[in-house]
Image (tube, helix red, strand yellow):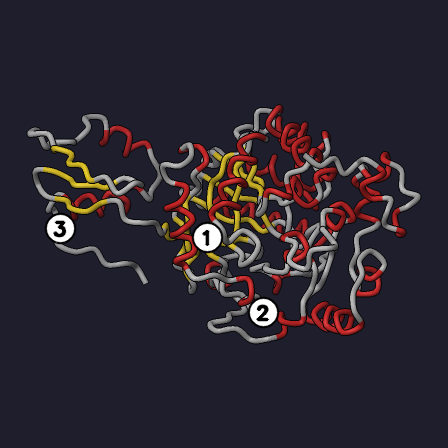
């Protein structure tokens, strides 16, 4: 496992030859030295003149920001280095792709107040910042890369918190962006404390790619603050085994040691992790650092990122390869976040062959076919269901409508438009 704090690892790059390990591992130093221009990139990496021109044009279209740490992971001898492909702007980003959309997930349409996306009945996405320590070239929300004043941010945060307070069906809030940990500790705590004071908010999730691209940004101050407001869950984003370094492990350990569970959401990216062997290795490495594989996303239809996308069949191949060949702990759910606001739809190989009244016929990962006999007693109603439902949110009645359909109490169920 690579230890990037070893001076030999980064001081061979002229730009950082005088940087001490203490500076390298310092959140403030890394943020002060982020690389944002084609000229700065050329001070760290070797490019042809044509590449420099193409990079500059790509940056004009979509902002670049990279931490020295993440740049140091690039294998400069490999033009298809998976870190390089995720980080370095390319002129192909200026080419329109098939199906490209400015807002591919229609998040703006489901935003009742600034910074909030309320698509699912019981949870909301709270976009607390539009700033990241690194801007991934495959970003879905590049339209939101802006800089707000602290006063404007605080006002919009309070509006979102007030909306959540008024909507008692919301029990789960995901703080994302941008990157939630790019806020100051104080500003992030103001949000978390405000949410924890709302009785119907049960779960708070922090979404951040910092453990992967900027692990020294996950300081004890942030972790100690979050620990006070349990239950808190942490959602992070690793895409390749090469991203799991000693520094990434240390950052995840700080979070996990505070009693905060960590889950990972990967994006399926062509030539980066679009191979079953690479993805399986990533899942194993994640479990080693106490991060649970959660989702693999089919790459979204955002503008300028068609070169990252794979056919959905590639995801099928990966899931078929992993199922049965590794622990269930290492199996994420492969999903398409449906264009137009359809939400996350699980897509997976079909292991169910036949379903009748008497039995179910299934196959396993090796192709073995088995029959499961259904019980003679079919009544599965729970005596406590009505009691529990009466104590749940107002959405419970609509949730039960599907089961009324199954039970024959109604003949149809139309979506609300």
Q: Which badge, 3 or 1, is on the more N-terminal residue?
A: 1
- Label 2 sits on a secondary structure element that is loop
Q: Label 2 vs label 1: CA separation?
A: 26 Å
Q: Quadrant of the C terminus?
A: bottom left
Q: Label 2 vs label 3: CA separation?
A: 46 Å
Other-residue count near label 1 (Cα within 10 Å), few / some / many at <14 / 14–19 / ≥20: many
Q: Which residue is mark 3?
A: 410
Q: Quadrant of the N terminus?
A: top right
Q: Is residue 124 left or right of residue 193?
A: left
Locate residue 178, reporting x and y percent.
63, 52
Circles 2, 1 touching at the beta carbon (< 8 Å): no
Figure check: 292 above or below 207: above
- Label 1 sits on a secondary structure element that is strand
The residue under the point 71% across, 35% down is 247
Q: Which badge, 2 or 3, is on the more N-terminal residue?
A: 2
Other-residue count near label 3 (Cα within 10 Å), few / some / many at <14 / 14–19 / ≥20: few
Q: Which residue is mark 1?
A: 118
Q: Is residue 196 left or right of residue 84?
A: left
Query: In terms of image quadrants, where is residue 251?
Result: top right
Circles 2, 3 touching at the beta carbon (< 8 Å): no
Query: In terms of image quadrants, where is residue 271?
Result: bottom right
């Amino acid at each position: 496992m690579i230890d990037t704090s070893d001076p030999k690892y980064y001081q061979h790059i002229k730009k950082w030859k005088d940087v001490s390990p203490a500076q390298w591992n310092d959140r403030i130093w890394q943020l002060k030295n982020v690389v944002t221009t084609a000229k700065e990139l050329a001070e760290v990496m070797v490019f042809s003149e044509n590449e420099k021109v193409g990079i500059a044009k790509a940056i004009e279209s979509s902002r670049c920001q990279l931490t020295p740490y993440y740049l140091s992971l690039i294998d400069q001898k490999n033009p298809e280095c998976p870190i390089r492909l995720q980080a370095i702007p390319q002129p192909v980003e200026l080419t329109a792709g098939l199906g490209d959309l400015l807002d591919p997930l229609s998040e703006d349409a489901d935003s009742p107040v600034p910074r909030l996306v309320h698509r699912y009945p019981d949870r909301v996405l709270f976009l607390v910042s539009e700033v990241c320590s690194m801007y991934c070239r495959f970003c879905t929300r590049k339209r939101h890369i802006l800089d707000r004043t602290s006063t404007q941010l605080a006002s919009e945060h309070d509006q979102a918190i007030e909306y959540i307070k008024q909507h008692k069906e919301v029990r789960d809030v995901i703080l994302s962006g941008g990157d939630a940990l790019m806020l100051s500790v104080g500003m992030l705590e103001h949000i978390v404390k405000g949410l924890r004071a709302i009785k119907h908010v049960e779960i708070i999730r922090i979404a951040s790619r910092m453990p992967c691209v900027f692990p020294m940004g996950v300081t004890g101050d942030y972790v100690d603050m979050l620990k006070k407001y349990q239950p808190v869950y942490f959602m992070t984003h690793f895409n390749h085994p090469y991203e799991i370094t000693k520094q990434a492990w240390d950052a995840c350990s700080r979070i996990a040691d505070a009693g905060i569970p960590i889950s990972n959401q990967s994006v399926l990216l062509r030539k980066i992790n679009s191979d079953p062997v690479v993805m399986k290795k990533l899942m194993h490495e994640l479990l080693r650092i106490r991060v649970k594989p959660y989702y693999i996303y089919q790459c979204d239809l955002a503008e300028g990122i068609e070169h990252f996308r794979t056919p959905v069949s590639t995801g099928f191949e990966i899931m078929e390869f992993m199922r049965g060949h590794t622990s269930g702990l290492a199996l994420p759910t492969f999903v398409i976040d449906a264009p137009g606001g359809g939400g996350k739809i699980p897509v997976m190989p079909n292991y169910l062959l036949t379903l009748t009244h008497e039995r179910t016929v299934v196959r396993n990962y090796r192709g073995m076919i088995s029959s499961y006999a259904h019980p003679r007693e079919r009544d599965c109603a729970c005596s406590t269901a009505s009691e529990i439902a009466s104590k749940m949110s107002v959405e419970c009645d609509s949730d039960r409508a599907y089961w009324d359909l199954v039970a024959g109490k109604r003949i149809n169920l139309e979506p609300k438009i």
